[in-house]
Image (cartoon, rainbow, N blue to C red):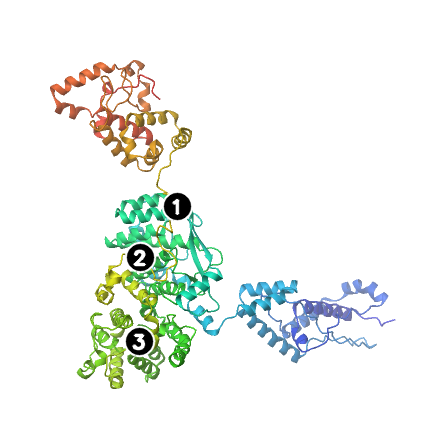
Amino acid sequence: MPPRLNKRQLRELEELQALKTDTTQDVTDPALQSEGSSPASPVAPKPAIGGFAALMGGEDGEEESEEEATQTRSSKSKKKKKKKKPSTTPSAVHTPAPVPTPEPTHESGAAHDSPAPSGPSKKERKALKKQKAKEKQKEDSMDDVDKALAELSLKYPDLKQQLATSAVTSSSPAAARSVAALLTVSLQHLDSEAELRKFFGSKVISAAKAGSSSSSSRQSVLQRSNLTRPQPSWWPAQLREGLSVRLLTSEEVDAQLRKHGWQPLRGEKLWTVEYSKKYRAVTFQFMRTVMSGDPEGFYQLLRALPYHADTLLQLSEVYHHREEHSTAADYVDRALFTYERGFVGAFNFTSGANRLDFDHVENRPFFLALHRQVTDLQRRGCVRTAFEFARLLYALDPWSDPHGALLHLECLAVKAGMSQWLVDLWDVFEPDVEKERQDGKSPYVKRLVPNVLPGVAYSRALALFIREESSGDKAHERSTEALKDAVRNFPPVVPILADKADILLSGDIRGHPAFRIQPDASMLLSDSHTIFHLLSHLYAQRASALWKPAARASWFAKTIASVYNTLPTASPAPPKPFINRFESPALSWSVYRHVLVNESTCRNLFPFVPRQVLDARHLACDPLPPSTRTNEYDPEFFRGVEDVLALRPRSRRQEARLLERLVPDGVLRGQLQDFWNAHPALAQRFPGGIVQFAQIAEQMPEVLEDIMVAVAGAGEDVPQMRAGDMPGGMPGAEVMVNFVDPEDEEEDVDDLLVPAAPARQEQSEDEDEDEEEEEQEVAPLPVRFVRSLVNRFWGGGSNNTANDSSDEEGDQLRDTGGVD
């Protein structure tokens, strides 16, 4: 029989068991498993207590003094403070590791020998802390998807193999991963208003917004967008608005690679937008409107499909030429919003790894909208937002850069404080470009890379100089060497940039043959030479302000003076990688397209654009389609579509049902039908019949009233009236009809009956006596008829004039024939 324990020993033993239980629940020990220790044994059971001890335990506990209990609690808190509790992180679920079995308690017969707890040793705690740090670092490097898969793999062991396989197959070369990381778009920097608030404050921007906002009462459902800020005045948007996106098949991707002469790259996905049947039909009508040259037709298209990107971009161009830049920018925002609504599913335009095929005509409006957004943001001074949109434009197709996004980024990167991004982009491609110079082999052969552009070379040197200035490096060795390389490869930039930035160069430098300025393409040998000098002019024109500070200008002049003697005395030729790319029309047309889209600021560069490009028929909605295009807006593209504005004949039952929905009031519907039948001239203005007439009446009552007045008042345009007929050819010789306000219905019924023939005779006598008096006193009956109809149809009050209010009640003609 085990010895009996006293009350204090029993209490301490219970507390020790509770402490062991907490340690088992809170502490996991993966270090023991990693060290190859054997599976831990379960926690030591509570020692058996003698029968008398078990019976007397509760009574002894009650009899224990408060002083002993206080001392026990204080000793317990001290033990917990000494033992550091490991932190837990909300990460993947870990299987609780067993706790090492504490050493058994050897109890002697002495009453004062109490058992001492044995926790993890100092070495074990150190190993546990180190293992926890490694796990936390590993969990931080995992994204949400990997964490979720790791959690599932603990529950379902079969998923471990799939997780490992997925990690292997998704790997790509280091260069591809670096390019995707550099092309990732920051969503928080796509908001131009946020950038303006940093400059001017939120109160100024809010006041300017409130002052320039229109008093439109249209309330749209709140829409989420990353590219724009949907306004309350916009039309309500559906999910996709006729646009969808799909992944190109492997056969289509192989065809594109053969067409461009490219080598396949891993880690990229190629997508294209698709039009719905209705969207294609509206696009067909859009092309007809463009060819007709009537801007009013675009508004009719927006009534059929409010979110049609081509129409919105065309209207934006119209307002841009009118110098209404805010309205033009609003239509560009709507076009971007249209395409963003179609980018659902796996396509993510911010990841840097998804591409849109520019050869498909369905994708080209989105490229154009982004390009116009970049130019407008630069006009407004939002350089950081403009940089982000330009990076998005570049990421959609970096290998042909169809709209010349790099020609914006080379300047915006320095202006927006993203110089390091430009340096990193150069460093990613430099090993492959150097390898191409040596043996002509590179995965980017015939693909556009930033290292072959003159503007990027000079901006990189300037970026390095700025970084060295901020770090206090006064030697500027790396930036000077980068500028020398830029001058050796692209010497035509030097004299043009010096003139634009007011940098003084000596006469010997100015007279060097390598620094000869070409004003046009007349003396140039090939397209690559033309692009070579065109890009030099373009960069000097845009980046001159960046080189004007005294320190940069002095460094530029000093570097040029040290390197110009090493340049060849013959006319400079473009580098070999430059020639290999811009001899093909695909990349050279990208530069020409960039110049055409920025016509307002690049018109002085048109002498470098070939005559066949300028004379070619290209539309503002699709400037200079690529030579490698897969499709375009031609009869083949629109085969099988219907004219969305063509009015299809309806049966009488369909027309009556539509009219009943438009005009629920049966009396008013009958009056409207009678007026329509009485004026055949309205059918010429409304080919859709009375239903279209009622729809226009609901949307634009003021315009409709003018049309109705003009039709009703044109006597020679309507059929000849018989004797006794009312003006406008209203059937019924006995009575004439006028519509009365509800207030007038309380008058005597006898006043409603007015003979028609005496009225006709009285009217003719008045015409013989005094025509002027008739024009002053009362408006013609058809006009009064129309005004009364409009007042009844829209509730009255908006179209009443002074003549209406001055009409005498006795002169009003009432309905005596019961016309509904």
Amino acid bearing label 1: Val
Q: Nearer the viewer, mark 1 or mark 3?
A: 1
Task: Indicate the secondary structure of the residue bearing disc 2.
Answer: helix
Counting from the top left corner in percent of width and height, residue 508 is at 19, 84
Q: Residues within 10 Å of mark 1 (few under 14, many from 20)?
A: some
Amino acid bearing label 3: Tyr
Task: Kindly report the distance in space between the C-alpha atoms of the residues bearing marks 3 and 2.
Answer: 37 Å
Counting from the top left corner in percent of width and height, residue 405 is at 34, 65
The image quadrant where one finds the N terminus is: bottom right
Q: Residue at x 58, y 74 (%)?
A: 134
Q: How many marks?
A: 3
Counting from the top left corner in percent of width and height, residue 196 is at 33, 61
Task: Kindly report the distance in space between the C-alpha atoms of the residues bearing marks 2 and 1.
Answer: 49 Å
Per the image, the residue denoted by label 3 is 458
Task: Indicate the secondary structure of the residue bearing disc 1.
Answer: loop
Q: Is residue 207 visible?
A: no
Q: Is residue 260 left or right of residue 538?
A: right
| Circle on res. 129 | none
Per the image, the residue denoted by label 1 is 641
